[in-house]
Image: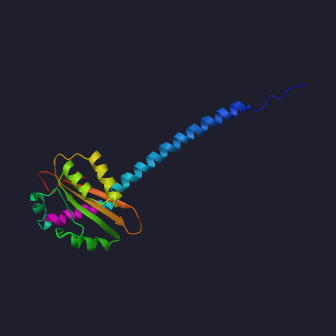
Amino acid sequence: MKLNKKGFMLAEVVIVASVITTVLVFLFISINRMSNAYDKRNRYYDIDAMYASMEINNILMRDNYIDEYIENDRDYISFLNNQESQGVDEYYDFYFNTGYDLVGVYYVKPSLESINKLNNSINNDNTYLKDYISYLKDNISFTNYKYLIIVELKKNDEDDIYFYTLKVKVGDTNETQS
């Protein structure tokens, strides 16, 4: 009787299948991490929010409100429904007509203490902003900046919130860096 030795043994098939499965799992994990990082980067450095922050900064500088905020002793100012939102109210109305909704605009002094005070003032329902401020604390250097303008933007057809922080350098309020 002659044995048929053509084909693979069961052990070989199991080993090759486990190697392929392991490679696919690692590939999935890597792609998932990369996708999450990409999504976070797009949400935290949104181009529309950047333009809004620059326009709000221009309005505050044009109407000379920014000097009052810099000399003020407060660590942060929230412009949302606030009597201190001089100059920004007109921008809320204008920006809403463009298809976006400004959820919040914040003037913040560039220090970890100011960021922490802003974070403590946020209600627990706004987890998006809390996550963003946590991200800022870990990824921003506060040296050489005069003030920060944080913009929280919602695109009307989406549920996600987008952010941008405009960092204005010391010495020249016209020169900004993101």
The picture places residue 93, in percent across and down from the top left corner, at 27, 74
Residue in view at x 25 percent, y 58 percent? 121
176 vs 132, nearest the viewer:
132
Q: Is residue 5 above or below residue 130?
A: above
Residue positioned most to the top: 1
Q: What coloring was used for the rendering? A: rainbow
Classify residue 77 by image quadrant: bottom left
Residue in view at x 70 percent, y 30 percent? 11
Q: Quadrant of the N terminus?
A: top right
Q: In this view, does 125 lie to the left or right of 67?
A: right
Residue positioned most to the right: 1
Q: Is there any visible trace of residue 68 in the rendered image? A: yes
Total labels drawn: 0
Residue in view at x 65 percent, y 34 percent? 16
Q: Is residue 123 left or right of residue 112?
A: right
Stretch in magenta: 50-61
Query: Is residue 80 highlighted in magenta?
Result: no
Q: Is there any visible trace of residue 46 in the rendered image? A: no
78 vs 177, nearest the viewer:
78
The picture places residue 65, in percent across and down from the top left corner, at 12, 65
Classify residue 119 by image quadrant: bottom left
Q: Is residue 146 above or below residue 57?
A: above
The picture places residue 60, in percent across and down from the top left corner, at 16, 65
The picture places residue 14, in percent across and down from the top left corner, at 67, 34
137 vs 42, nearest the viewer:
137
Secondary structure mostly seen in magenta is helix
